[in-house]
Image (cartoon, rainbow, N blue to C red):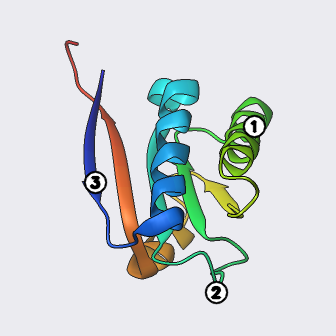
């Protein structure tokens, strides 16, 4: 079971697309997903990305699922948004730097005993 905390400052098309992206990732990755953080706006990019995806372990399967979710959301929004994910793990120093700029954050924490 996941516990969700969410801070949303971005609204409109971009904000909705990020929320749907986070929900899809939660569904696809389950406990492997730690956090999704997005910039307030689609552009400008930070580290060539506008969404940070933090996973417990970055492997080919996880990357594939993230990219699949990205394409699904972009199609759902008629290609009017472009999600550029940065996929990393919690110990990467880039997480803190990205979080300083992030306007939307969704954390996925595993609750013990559920």
Between the C-alphas of marks 1 and 3, the distance is 23 Å
Q: Which mark is residue 6?
A: 3
Quadrant housing the C terminus: top left
Q: Quadrant of residue 46?
A: bottom right
Residue farthest to the left, as pictured: 113
Q: Quadrant of the N terminus?
A: top left
Answer few, some or many: residues within 10 Å of disc 2's Cα (few below 14, many 20 plus, some between 14 and 19).
few
Q: Residue 57 appears at what percent x and percent y?
A: 60, 38
Q: Which residue is mark 1?
A: 68
Q: Which comes before the other along the chain, label 1 or label 3? A: 3
Where residue 58 appears, as percent x and y from the top left, is: 67, 42
Of residues 3 and 59, the one drawn nearer to the viewer in this rendering:
3
From the viewer's perspective, tell me whether residue 96 is left or right of residue 114: right
**Which of the 4 quarters of the picture holds residue 65?**
top right
Residue drawn 66% across the image and 52% down it: 77
Q: Which residue is label 2 attached to?
A: 44
Where residue 63 sits in the image (x, y, percent)? Answer: 74, 41
Question: Circle 1 — which element?
Answer: helix
Q: Residue at x 32, y 64 (%)?
A: 8
- Mark 3 → mark 2, Cα distance in angstroms: 22 Å
Left or right: residue 52 compared with residue 5: right
Q: CA distance from mark 1 to mark 2?
A: 23 Å
On the image, the x and y values in percent for residue 79 come to 76, 57
């Amino acid at each position: 079971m996941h516990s969700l905390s969410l801070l949303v400052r971005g609204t409109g098309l971009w904000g909705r697309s990020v929320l749907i992206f986070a929900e899809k990732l939660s569904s696809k990755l389950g406990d492997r997903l730690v956090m999704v953080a997005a910039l307030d706006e689609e552009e400008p990019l930070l580290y060539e990305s506008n969404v940070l995806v933090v996973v417990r372990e970055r492997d080919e399967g996880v990357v594939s699922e993230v990219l699949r979710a990205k394409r699904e959301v972009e199609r759902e929004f008629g290609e009017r948004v472009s999600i550029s994910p940065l996929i990393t793990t919690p110990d990467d120093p880039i997480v803190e730097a990205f979080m300083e700029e992030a306007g939307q954050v969704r954390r996925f924490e595993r609750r013990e005993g559920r």
